[in-house]
Amino acid sequence: MKLSTRGQYGTRALLELALHQGDGPVLLRNIAQKQQISLQYLERLISPLIAGGVVRSTRGAKGGVSLARAPEEIRLSEVVRLLEGSVAPVECVDNPEACNRSELCVTRDIWGELKQAIDDVLDSTTLKDLVERQKRKKQSEAEMYYI
């Protein structure tokens, strides 16, 4: 299974918002620049996140986008589902009727286990977890230059 740029870039944009949580709305062009994402593409990614209740949009002179909930309340499983849909590697995992062999197919069982493992990782990871990981990486990077 390969995550598309929708899931990758959407998660990076949300990480950027989580890093600035409490600072007020962030302009999309600033997120695009910081995360090296096309502004036009980012604009398309934000819409489903707003509709899904993950991001809030604020108009006006001090407008922009911000997280609609605290970073610890937003799980990557929700983000990926909004941007990508199911993480099932094959259609029959979510829709057994897609294949007349579904009930007897042992490979479908493996694909189902794979989907469950991915779901478990995404469901156990929040935006707050990503923020903490990002801070640790930056700290490690800074320490490398001062040794």
Image (cartoon, rainbow, N blue to C red):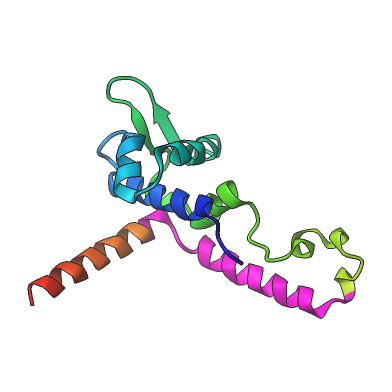
| Residue furthest out toward the right | 100
Q: Residue at x 52, y 50 (%)?
A: 6
Tally the numbered discs.
0
In the rendered image, residue 59, in percent from the top left (x then y), is placed at: 37, 22
Of the 4 image quadrants, the one containing the N terminus is bottom right
Q: Residue at x 71, y 70 (%)?
A: 112
Q: Nearer the viewer, residue 147 or 40?
A: 40
Q: Residue at x 57, y 46 (%)?
A: 82
Which quadrant of the structure image shows residue 48? top right
> Residue 108 vs residue 4: left or right?
right
Q: Nearer the viewer, residue 21 or 48?
A: 48
Of the 4 image quadrants, the one containing the C terminus is bottom left
Magenta part of the chain:
104-129
Residue 115 is a magenta residue? yes
> Residue 20 vs residue 7: left or right?
left
Q: Residue at x 36, y 56 (%)?
A: 128
- Magenta: main secondary structure: helix
